[in-house]
Amino acid sequence: MDKDAILEKFQGGEVFDKPSFRQSVHSLYPDCSEAMINWLLHSFREKGILSSVGAGKYYVTSAHEATKKMYIYPHSPEFFDLETQITDRFPLLKFQMWELIQMNDFVNHQIAKNVIFIETENMMVNSVYEDLHTRHPYAMIEPDTALFYKLRGPDTDIVVQKLPSEAPAPLINHSCTLEKIVVDILSKKLTGQLIERSEYPAIYEGIFNKFHIDETRMFRYARRRNLYNALRSFIFEQTNIQLKTIQ
């Protein structure tokens, strides 16, 4: 099959869905089966010819897009120790984690003191906090900004808080996705108060330039957190990010 002919109408970064892809294939190969269409979509994505911006939404990968990677962060030893402790103590627990120093890949002024956020289902927040607090006396449970700065310890800070419902699921173990982090740091709660706002444009542009971002997942989560308008306005007004989808 002639892949260039199939994808010709989608050049230039246009986002399209599976029905549009099917129509393009059938215009050239009318007898092409649904199984073959599914295989073509899968094959094109595996080869990096197509990229995805959400469930069932694709675009032809440009030379720049081809350099983007899936986000995998080499977490600190403290992060992995905490993850193991929680998993061993609560093997069935649903939780996610991220650490503030992840943002050092994107900020101009490096973050020297780390904060590890542990987010767990609501009814287990107290149990996880109490268990961790016996080994980590400076661990905190859902502090506001003022209390956080009052209770900070000499080493890495640990914050246990509620995992928002419908948060994007981790891709690897319990490490939060970038789609979740970029929404959370825009909030007016603690997660949005630990980095200077002047750093935000560089953070967002660095993330979108270097890594694949599922825009559909990101904006769905932003809606859940009542941050949809804030996120959309920030991206359009304060960054040079070109969204692939019109949200």
Image (cartoon, rainbow, N blue to C red):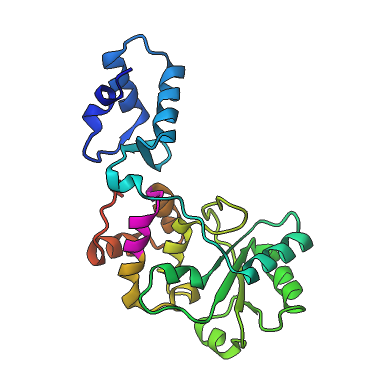
Q: Where is residue 102 drawn, in percent x and y? A: 48, 68
Residue 44 falls in which quadrant of the image? top left
User: Is 199 part of what is drawn in magenta?
Assistant: no
Instruction: Choose between 233 and 156: the one closer to the eye.
Output: 156
Residue 224 can be seen in this image:
no
Instruction: Choose between 174 and 110: the one closer to the eye.
Output: 110
30 relative to 68, above or below = above
- Residue at image point 29% right, 48% down: 64
Q: Which residue lies most toward the top here?
A: 31
| Image quarter of the N terminus | top left
237 relative to 220, above or below = below
Q: Where is residue 84 drawn, in percent x and y? A: 71, 63
Q: Where is residue 172 drawn, in percent x and y? A: 58, 52
Q: Magenta segment range? A: 204-215
- Residue at image point 35% right, 35% down: 49
Left-right relation of 130 to 147: right
Q: Which residue lies most toward the bottom here?
A: 150
- Residue at image point 41% right, 56% down: 223
Q: Where is residue 42 drawn, in percent x and y? A: 44, 29
Left-right relation of 14 to 85: left
How many numbered marks have been drawn onto this rendered protein structure? 0
Residue 78 can be seen in this image:
yes
User: Is 210 part of what is drawn in magenta?
Assistant: yes
Left-right relation of 146 to 232: right
63 relative to 7, above or below = below
Residue 211 falls in which quadrant of the image? bottom left
Residue 91 falls in which quadrant of the image? bottom right
- Considering the whole magenta stretch, tell me its main secondary structure: helix
